[in-house]
Image (cartoon, rainbow, N blue to C red):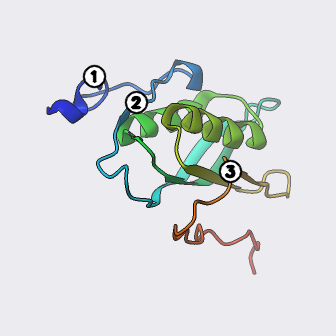
Amino acid sequence: MGSKTTGLTLLGGATAIPESPDKAILERVPNPHPDTAYVARFAAPEFTSLCPVTGQPDFAHLVIDYVPADWLVESKSLKLYLASFRNHGAFHEDCTVAIGKRLAKLLEPAYLRIGGYWYPRGGIPIDVFWQSGAVPPNVWLPDQGVPPYRGRG
């Protein structure tokens, strides 16, 4: 692997899903275009966590948009981090905001937003949105593309 991947520990081999988000390693790589404002998007349509009260599974479609500055998130580490929530008990709001804050701290992006589109439990869908600040000027930020929950229509 080249100099851009120096120090990465997860890429290029079999890796177990971390036991918890706290134990998950998130890695970053240099942005090859730090002088250009652009949006990178990650969608996780099968995100799962556990209800901290009942232990029942909760499901969400997460969409993460960010405008990188000096760093990009390494995608395998992000995938493993998100998978680490599979056995983690937390409310929808906590999961969504914690993911956004951890990515913002790691990447120090020009902008980051996360949309957590949670599937109904107990008859109520909960959508959670968090962003790090204002959208930078001259950045095209598309709609996240996840329709609001409508039931059986």
Q: Is residue 52 above or below residue 72?
A: above
118 lies left or right of 64: right
- Upstream in sequence: badge 2 or badge 1: 1
Q: Residue at x 77, y 42 (%)?
A: 93
The x, y position of residue 51, in whole percent, is 75, 35
Label 2 to label 1: alpha-carbon separation: 9 Å
* Left or right of 78 in this view: 22: right
Q: Is residue 129 above or below residue 144?
A: above
Distance of label 3 from label 2 (alpha carbons): 23 Å
Disc 1 crowd rating (10 Å Cα; few below 14, some 14-19, many 20+) is few
User: Is there a contact, CB below 8 Å, between mark 3 and mark 2?
Assistant: no
Marks 3 and 1, how far apart in space?
30 Å
SS label for mark 3: loop
In the image, 41 versus 127, the foreground residue is: 41
The quadrant in which the C terminus is found is: bottom right
Q: Is residue 63 left or right of residue 15?
A: right
Helix, strand or loop for disc 1: loop
| Residue under the image location 47 percent in, 23 percent down | 18
Image coords of residue 10 (percent x, y)? 31, 27
Q: Is residue 114 left or right of residue 110?
A: right
Q: Using the image as rendered, state which of residue 124 and residue 137 is in the foreground.
A: 137
At numbered mark 2, what does the secondary structure look like: helix, strand or loop? loop
Callout 2 environment at 10 Å: few (<14), some (14 to 19), or many (20+)? many
Q: Residues within 10 Å of mark 3 (few under 14, many from 20)?
A: few
Residue 151 quadrant: bottom right
Query: Dots 2 and 1: beta carbons under 8 Å?
Result: yes
Q: Which residue is mark 1?
A: 7
Picture disc at residue 133: 3
When asked about the image quadrant of residue 123, the answer is bottom right
| Residue type, label 1 | Gly
Q: Earlier in the sequence, mark 3 or mark 1?
A: 1
- Residue position marked by numbered label 2 in the rendering: 27
